[in-house]
Amino acid sequence: MAADIPSIKHQIWLRDAETQKVMSALNEGATARFVGGCVRNALLGVPVADVDIATSDEPARSTAKLEAAGFKVVPIGADHGTVMAVGAERSYEVTTLRVDVETNGRHADVAFTQDWQGDAERRDFTMNALYADADGTVHDPLGGYDDLKARRVRFIGDAETRIKEDYLRVLRFFRFHAAYGEGDLDAPSLQACAANRDGLAKLSAERIQVELLKLLGADNAGPVVRAMAAAGIMGDVLPEASRLDRFERVLDIEVTQLFTSDPVLRLGAIVDGEEAAASAAKRLRLSNADRDRLTAMHTDQTKIVCYLSMREVRRALYGMGLQLFKDRVMLGWADDGKTTNAFQWRALLAMADTWERPEIPLSGSMIKAAGVPEGPEIGRVRAEVEEWWIDSDFTDDEFSIIERLKAVVQATVY
């Protein structure tokens, strides 16, 4: 363990009473330590989302201890050593120390162990093989802290061996570099990823989707995606990715303008055209909502320009809806070669965020009272009046709307 590794004892999540209660229960007659992302992120000074714990106890014993301490325990992967302790503030994944017995490129058969070194050696990257005691003391069995300080994402041991244990690690290598790395990608790791990219075909679309969207959403995704494309890996997992230039510009806009990262928008930027969007959605098995959003970005290529008037903005918002309008604004901004137009593009987004969708004050009973018979004619008349209403910039003058209704009805013989 490197002598200069700082303690993480001041982390709020670590000092939380509930977290300490979990650790106190697990440390009765055994050893439990925080592991992986929570330790890595704490050392980097970035937010910690998930708190994972490794323990020398087997799952049944961990479960008994946690239940005795008052926690609900869910066996989310007990065969592989993982149970979840559900607290009032967060959940904790508790995994028994383990070593791989057999791997097939997708998952591993494991055996439980008491060997912390062996548990560390089965993990993916050195920066993820960091452990911490309940008091914040960090343990580094594989020299991961030096890699973490250097922002270097490096496989544990032989990169090719680690990849063949689970081919998803190819994508995880790029994703972790985009999220935590700096400078050039680790050359031996990159070479091993390129040499074993055919193994990605063994993975489910759902696993690839989750990892790819996390990668696209990272702040440093631009050069990493370029490296993936150069290695032939992007062409394997997303052959529809033909607009790396627009993807990079959307990423730059989100980062420099302090917008929240939007992986689905970035996916929409990297593909081009309705057919490519539909193909990507199917390939990645996106949720229905994400599929519909992605394809809508590329359906009916109505472009948004930065000099729209407020009236034109309201009309576009009414026709497209808020999400699609904002997506089209971002894609239009990315395709705009003039950086001096940034203020206008931001103004469009600001107008959209303050917009409230109006409702036309025209009911079916009003249309029937005007002499329109029950049936499809009611919908046709309403649509014609609504079109006029939109052109009038959504007037709320009920008298004018009724007069327009009368004119539409009088022009039709029933």
Image (cartoon, grey):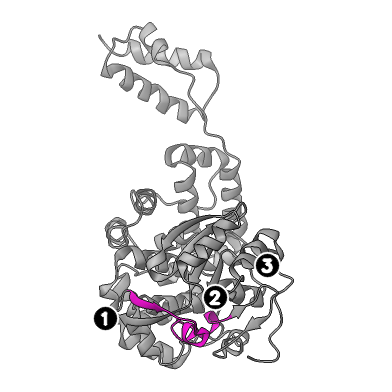
Along the viewing direction, whichever of 212 and 401 lies nearer the viewer: 212
Against 296, residue 40 (above or below) is below
Boundaries of the magenta span: 107-130
Instruction: Determine whether, in the image, residue 298 is placed left or right of residue 313.
Output: left
In reply to whether residue 2 is colored magenta, the answer given is no
Point out the tag, 3 or 2, that comes first from the N-terminus: 3
Residue at 48% from the left image edge and 89% from the top image edge: 186
Marks 3 and 2, Cα distance to the nearest angstrom?
14 Å
Please say if the residues under marks 1 and 3 sit with CB atoms less than 8 Å apart.
Answer: no
Against 233, residue 89 (above or below) is above
Point out the tag, 1 or 2, that comes first from the N-terminus: 2
Label annotation for residue 198:
1
Residue 217 appears in the picture as rendered: no
The spot of residue 259 in percent (x, y) is 59, 59
**Residue placed under numbered mark 3 in the picture:** 14
The spot of residue 215 in percent (x, y) is 46, 70
Alpha-carbon neighbours of circle 3 within 10 Å: few (<14), some, or many (≥20)? Answer: many
**Residue placed under numbered mark 2 in the picture:** 36
The image quarter containing residue 99 is: bottom left
Along the viewing direction, whichever of 214 and 300 lies nearer the viewer: 214
Point out the tag, 1 or 3, that comes first from the N-terminus: 3
Residue at 63% from the left image edge and 86% from the top image edge: 149
